[in-house]
Image (tube, rainbow, N blue to C red):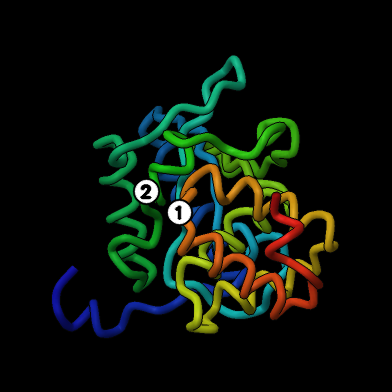
């Protein structure tokens, strides 16, 4: 994509992301390729209709195998990367509109039962598995705490998920398995308090 096209790159709302994924699936199917990917983050929220804002990209946390096991993707396979680039050029999207998200989610452990809460969307040669709402609460709470005291899109997305207090506390405990430092715990407690959880720090034990 040339510099002029980069300047024209458009964020994707729900319709735009659906269109891009459908185009990607068609390209893959035409070439006899097939991939199953697991989507998290803003792209997942957009596809589910939980948020109305646009997203510049969609994050893949891993590839789903036929036996249901999820394995990490450190970089997009060549055939998938080539198709992603072609769809980007055809639809005026950012070159990395579909990209590899944080690898630590798989390396340090997904929330228990993650695989059982996945839902699926089919786009010809592309199968997209969407993380469940509880898992999105885990990921968004972790990101909101990591960015605290900045109140950015992660906190807005977390509010849009409307998590229960129990889910927030459970998600916070999962988040601490990824970062057990006292500083991160303090930021987690601050976010929970901001969201209305009373005595957050004491309840994280």
Q: Position of residue 14 (x, y in %)?
A: 62, 69
In the rendered view, does 58 fall on the left or right side of 133? left
In the rendered view, does 42 fall on the left or right side of 79? right
Residue indicated by mark 2: 100
What residue lies at 23% left-to-right and 78% top-to-bottom?
5
Q: Are marks 2 and 1 in contact (CB under 8 Å)?
A: no
Q: Which mark is residue 142?
A: none
- Quadrant containing the N terminus is bottom left
Residue indicated by mark 1: 181
What residue lies at 59% left-to-right and 62% top-to-bottom?
140
Q: Is residue 190 above or below residue 166?
A: below
Q: Position of residue 139 (x, y in %)?
A: 58, 55
What residue lies at 31% left-to-right and 41% top-to-bottom?
76
Determine whether the residue tagged by mark 2 lies in a helix, strand or loop: strand
Q: Residues within 10 Å of mark 2 (few under 14, many from 20)?
A: some
Compare residues 68 and 151 and report the one nearer the observer.
151
Query: Quarter of the image holding residue 30?
Result: top left
Q: Position of residue 37 (x, y in %)?
A: 50, 38
Query: Quarter of the image holding residue 114?
Result: top right
């Amino acid at each position: 994509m040339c510099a002029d096209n980069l300047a024209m790159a458009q964020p994707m709302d729900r319709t735009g992301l659906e269109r891009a994924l459908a185009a990607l699936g068609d390209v893959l199917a035409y070439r006899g390729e097939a991939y199953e990917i697991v989507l998290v983050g803003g792209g997942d929220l957009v596809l589910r209709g939980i948020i109305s804002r646009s997203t510049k990209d969609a994050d893949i946390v891993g590839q789903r195998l036929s036996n249901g096991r999820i394995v990490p993707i450190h970089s997009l396979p060549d055939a998938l990367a080539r198709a992603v680039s072609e769809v980007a050029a055809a639809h005026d999207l950012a070159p990395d509109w579909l990209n590899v998200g944080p690898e630590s989610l798989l390396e340090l452990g997904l929330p228990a039962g993650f695989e059982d809460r996945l839902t699926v969307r089919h786009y010809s040669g592309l199968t997209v598995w969407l993380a469940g709402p509880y898992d999105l609460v885990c990921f968004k709470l972790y990101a909101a705490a990591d960015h605290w005291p900045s109140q950015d899109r992660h906190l807005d997305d977390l509010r849009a998920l409307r998590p229960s207090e129990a889910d927030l506390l459970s998600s916070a405990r999962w988040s601490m398995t990824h970062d057990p430092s006292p500083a991160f715990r303090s930021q987690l407690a601050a976010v929970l308090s901001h969201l209305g959880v009373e005595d957050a720090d004491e309840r994280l034990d």
